[in-house]
Image (cartoon, grey):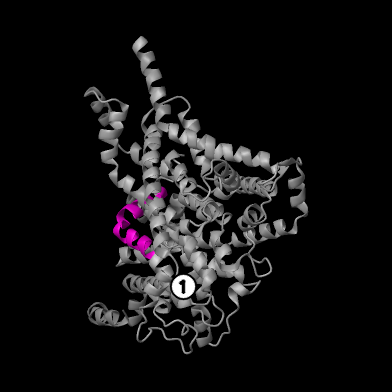
Amino acid sequence: MLGKNRMFWRRNIEGYLFISPWIFGFVVFTAGALLGSFSISLTKWNVVGTPEIVGLANYQKMVEDRFFWQSIKVTLYYLLNVPLNVVLGLLLALLLNQKVKGLSVFRTIFFLPSVASGVAVSLLWMWIFNPRFGIINVLLKKIGIIGPLWLGSEAWAIPALIIMSIWGVGGGMLIYLGALQGIPTAFYEAATLDGAGAWKKLLHITVPMITPVLLLNLVMGVIVSFQVFTQAYVMTDGGPNYATLFYVMYLYQQAFVWFNMGYASALSWILFLIILVFTVIILKTSSSWVYYESD
Amino acid sequence: MSSQIAADSVPGRQKRDLSSVRYFQSQRFQNRVATILIFLVLIAGTIFVMLPFFWMISTSLKRPGTEFAFPIEWIPNPPYWPNYPDAWTLLPFSTWFLNTVNITSVSIIGHVVSCAIVGFGFARIRFVGRDVLFVLVLATLMLPYPSIVAPLFLLFKNLGWIDTFLPLIVPTFFASNAFYIFLLRQFFRTIPMDLDDAARVDGCNTFGVFWHIALPLTRPAMGVIAVFSFMLHWNDFLGPLIFLSTTENFTLALGLRFFQGQYQVQWSLLMATSLVILMPTIVVFFVAQKYYIQGIVVTGIKG
């Protein structure tokens, strides 16, 4: 009895010792930062002086701040890339799963762009979208279409960034492919015996079986899209006429260009809450369309 | 493709049945059409994916100033190689390269070591509150980094760490990436518990089990995390942008952005540098493709 008790304590102490790096990191860099950010959001502070407590004024200011609403609008518009990427990624994965020849070659090719990211890729796409000399408009001209100004146009800047995001569709594709290959072939054999055609198999076996992964990609896609920064900073600097003033871009400007730490922290908290609400909504509705094998 | 079909189908048609209508309705014909359609879509996709890379290489080999010449020279003749050394030496890219290597390699060690230890704790030791804490780990996946970057900046400023590599490196030693913890936990859970018990009977303590049993069996998983962490830090932009200020301390990503500001329309030079900066990630991807794909597939299956 005593031995059992000692074992219990030992296990707990060891368990917490093993996860202690994470606990420390979580307390300091995550929870601490979040709480710190909340208390700063109740102040007016430009980093050098002393913070002046202003209560909820920063949050009230947001309601009337047209740039805040612009950044919300821009970010929500850009969210269109998520369903597009989910559908296209799934489509590619389904095609590759047809036992096509050269599967691994195609897989590598499609995945390659998701490896490349950051400033270098942003510069590349800036050059691709160059209105006169970029490859897109040059090719469009060949078939007699005068291409838009892309990043220089209020109407086309976000569509351009969505096209750029589709270039990275291979990342999602690879996840779907893994899930597709995990579906037991016995399911399909049974369906064939029951006389189901290809379309029925897709609708009643394949799609339900990969809904958990669809959910994962949907949630991650939304979270990532809310954090777009590098592209906007490098390619458009938020312009033209604030057409690409993404939420995080605006947050960055408030915090590190104008050093309005109080207001920026309030923006941080609202960003956190928006993502939380989106995730909860997706997860809540998911119980009606996501299929778990164990159910 | 089409000639192959013609060659295949002609004798088949003569032998089996002469009515071509029947052939067009046959399963075999439909499968062929489907295969061709799939290939066409895949090839269209390949063009969409590869064209930007081709465009990048092509531009990087043009003599500066000729990027804007019509008609477009798709394959520069002769290729202008000096762009590569020129772009590299115009600004202190060698320093930035070393800085990036420094930050990236230390961060990889930090992530692999700390996430392995933490992942093992969550996967193999049953302690009170484990499941609740693990949900908390997953919840931090949702937390956007930009949301905490302002308070982190203030914290590191108080510590006197601004314009050093510490703000980028130190958090990695505290398992700062929830996704890696999650992945490693999944890998550790695949090891049969019997092995742990056998090792304990042989006198191993828990750390011994971790060190002698779990780690050697999950070496590929460590590779996955190392590759992910490499990609993350090599390309990171927001972190260096906020925490580094003097040019000598820049990373490649930051330096490239600086370069863009200085040589705005010199696309041949910009593309040459961008390509050089992307090269390590592409090489690592090809070398470690097995690990990389495995990591993502695990996300898919266990997600």
Main secondary-structure element of the magenta-colored stretch: helix
Give coordinates of residue A71: x percent, y percent. Answer: 67, 59
Q: Is residue B141 above or below residue B203?
A: below
- Is A31 displayed left or right of A62 in the figure? left
Give coordinates of residue B89: x percent, y percent. Answer: 40, 70
- Is B115 displayed left or right of B290 in the figure? right
Please indicate, yes or no, whether residue B300 appears anywhere in the rendered image: yes
The residue under the point 30% across, 67% down is A102
Give coordinates of residue B172: x percent, y percent. Answer: 44, 43
- The residue under label 1 is B270
Please indicate, yes or no, whether residue A199 appears anywhere in the rendered image: no
| Residue at the outermost top position | A1
Q: Chain of mark 1?
A: B
Give coordinates of residue B264: x percent, y percent. Answer: 53, 74
Residue type, label 1: Leu
- Residue B6 placement: quadrant: bottom left
Task: From the viewer's side, name the closer residue of B94 and A63.
Answer: B94
The residue under the point 46% across, 36% down is A22
Q: Is residue B297 magenta?
A: yes
- Is label 1 in a helix, a strand or a loop? helix
Q: Is residue B81 above or below residue A96?
A: below
Q: Which residues are magenta?
A: B278-300
The residue under the point 42% across, 63% down is A116
- Residue B19 placement: quadrant: bottom left
